[in-house]
Image (spheres, rainbow, N blue to C red):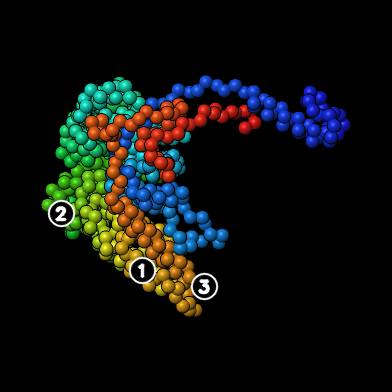
């Protein structure tokens, strides 16, 4: 409108009279409507193939509403920035998805877009969200580029042939997308490891290096001595990453030839010092990394700040089978070996390598020896120097033993250093572990500090405590009387935190109950010989039909639907 006060604009009908700026806007509005009304509709795009059927059962109504509530996101933050006593719904979604998949339900069709959006935003949700979405979710993901992530990796599993269908498996393996081939290999390996290995071996020589690496990583499932010959050949691969992965897998097979070679190298570097007055360990690290060591997966160049010889030693000990050490140390068991003093400041390097070997080989006896007693100070265990190492060692123990060890650790040291250890315990926490966590939180509350230092543990407790624990925590939700020794307002903050914990546990209990309800009957096609044939109804317009299992609109009377009106193609313009 700049300049309309000096000269009347030309080229527009209807600008005469009135204020020039207003007349110009009115003429522009008329022109815009005229242009839009005259727009000719373009040709319709072809309809996609119908979505595949999903025979799984539908969610109970209460569980469906709960899913919609969880997908809607977390509660709105309070103006003060405090979480308040309201449960964090977003943090409960992963648990709900796991429970629903365990019951064998499928996602309602109307919820699929929100479910895919949530999985797109949070990678931790993707495995369970795509499993719940099933083949129909993957069909929908093909229609929207923003959901393309669902078609990568194991997400393509909804379109896989049955592992027993040799012809279908071979066709997809030779012609499918990379994501479909990775998912196919994992599925066949889970059903028949030998068949999966044969599938991969048939095309190994023509695969790209990055694809060979992903395929090789898929062999972790069902790894056995039968894979040794293939993995041994992969040690000569032209890709360094492929060679390293093959060596790692072979070192997890204690009877493999590579494990034997690594054992020979390791025991030549580490042994019992028989000249000392008391038994001790003597270490002579390798002086070079020869071609044979490099072929077996030893990386020659250390990272910045690491010495070459200690770097090579750690890799040799890590890859050697742990069964080679008792004979080397006069028949001593893991605990006795770990307790031996190590000369020349090699203890930290040697024990760290043994920790990695115990985790890789899933050896519970060595893990117990390296963990030591839970009452030992966190950084001075017999074979560990960090809580991260302890957490990895704990993952090799049976779940009940793992929970008891962490419960004893918390009783001895409190919660300040237990967060990583709690993360490897099975959910819901066993009763002794849950009681230890609650007791430690109660002690921290009575000490008068603020609960913010324990927010991580409190968040874990909300997700991992057994839901039935809520009835034992009501006494902790009361606001205690404040004294001079207590930080100002700490009692109120603790009361709020425990109220949120109790509310979350009760919500989780409700989730379990809702998913345990008797589900509606699964959607099944009608039987032609028993079901009456309905009268032909009006044919819906293209593009307006419902998806195969979409539920009818509530309140719609039975019988044929009224004929829809003519389809309207929405217009678009550069300004819309």
Measured Cα–Cα span from mark 1 to mark 3: 23 Å
- In which quadrant will I find the C terminus? top right
- Residue 337: give x, y in percent of width and height: 19, 54
Answer whether residue 310 is visible to the viewer in this image.
no
Q: Residue furthest front?
A: 535
Tag 2 and tag 3, C-beta contact below 8 Å: no
- Dot 2 corresponds to which residue? 333
User: How many residues crowd around disc 1 within 10 Å: few (fewer than 14), some, or many (20 or more)?
Assistant: some
Q: Quadrant of residue 341?
A: bottom left
- Residue 125: give x, y in percent of width and height: 38, 44
- Residue 431: give x, y in percent of width and height: 27, 63
Image disc number at residue 473: 1
Image disc number at residue 488: 3
Q: Which of the two marks, 1 or 3, is nearer to us in this view?
A: 1
Secondary structure at badge 3 equals loop
Of 463 and 362, which appears nearest the observer?
463
- Does label 1 or label 3 sit earlier along the sequence? 1
Q: Residue furthest right?
A: 6
């Amino acid at each position: 409108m700049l300049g309309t006060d000096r000269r009347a604009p030309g080229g527009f009908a209807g600008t005469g009279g009135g204020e020039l700026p207003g007349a110009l806007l009115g003429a522009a509005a008329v022109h815009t409507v005229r242009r839009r009304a005259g727009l000719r509709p373009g040709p319709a795009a072809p309809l996609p193939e119908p979505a595949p059927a999903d025979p799984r059962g539908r969610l109970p109504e209460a569980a469906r509403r709960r899913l919609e509530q969880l997908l809607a996101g977390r509660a709105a933050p309070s103006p003060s920035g405090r979480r308040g006593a309201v449960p964090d719904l977003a943090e409960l979604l992963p648990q709900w998805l796991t429970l629903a998949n365990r019951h064998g339900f499928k996602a309602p069709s109307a919820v699929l877009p929100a479910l895919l959006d949530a999985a797109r935003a949070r990678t931790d949700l993707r495995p369970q969200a795509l499993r719940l979405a099933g083949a129909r979710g993957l069909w929908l993901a093909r229609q929207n580029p923003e959901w393309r992530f669902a078609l990568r990796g194991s997400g393509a599993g909804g379109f896989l042939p049955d592992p027993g269908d040799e012809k279908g498996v071979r066709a997809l393996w030779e012609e499918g997308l990379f994501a479909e081939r990775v998912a196919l290999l994992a599925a066949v390996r889970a059903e028949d490891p030998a068949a999966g290995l044969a599938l991969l071996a048939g095309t190994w020589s023509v695969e790209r290096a990055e694809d060979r690496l992903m395929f090789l990583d898929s062999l972790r499932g069902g790894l056995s001595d039968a894979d040794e010959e293939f993995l041994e050949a992969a040690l000569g691969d032209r890709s360094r990453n492929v060679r390293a992965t093959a060596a790692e897998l072979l070192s997890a097979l204690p009877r493999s030839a590579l494990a034997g070679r690594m054992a020979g190298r390791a025991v030549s570097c580490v042994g019992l010092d028989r000249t000392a007055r008391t038994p001790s360990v003597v270490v002579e690290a390798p002086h070079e990394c020869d071609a044979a060591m490099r072929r077996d997966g030893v990386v020659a160049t250390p990272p910045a700040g690491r010495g070459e010889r200690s770097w090579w030693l750690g890799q040799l000990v890590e890859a050697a089978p742990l069964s080679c050490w008792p004979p080397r140390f006069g028949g001593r068991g893991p605990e006795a070996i770990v307790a031996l003093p190590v000369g020349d400041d090699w203890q930290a390097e040697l024990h760290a390598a043994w920790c990695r070997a115990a985790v890789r080989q899933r050896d519970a006896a060595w893990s117990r020896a390296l963990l030591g007693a839970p009452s030992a100070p966190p950084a001075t265990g017999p074979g560990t120097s960090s809580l991260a190492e302890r957490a990895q060692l704990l993952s090799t123990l049976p779940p009940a033993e793992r929970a008891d060890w962490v419960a004893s650790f918390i009783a001895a040291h409190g919660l300040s250093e237990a967060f990583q250890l709690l993360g490897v315990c099975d959910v819901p926490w066993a009763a002794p572990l849950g009681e230890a966590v609650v007791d430690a939180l109660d002690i921290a509350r009575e000490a008068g500090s603020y609960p913010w230092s324990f927010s991580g543990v409190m968040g874990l407790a909300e997700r991992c405590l057994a839901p039935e624990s809520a009835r034992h925590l009501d006494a902790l939700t009361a606001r205690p009387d404040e004294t001079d020794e207590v930080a100002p307002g700490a009692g109120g903050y603790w009361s709020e935190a425990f109220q949120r914990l109790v509310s979350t546990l009760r919500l989780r209990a409700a989730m379990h109950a809702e998913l345990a309800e008797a589900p509606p009957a699964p959607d099944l096609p009608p039987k032609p010989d028993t079901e009456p044939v309905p009268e032909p109804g009006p044919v819906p317009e293209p593009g307006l039909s419902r998806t195969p299992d979409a539920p009818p609109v509530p309140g719609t009377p039975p019988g044929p639907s009224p004929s829809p009106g003519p389809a309207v193609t929405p217009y678009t313009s550069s300004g819309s």
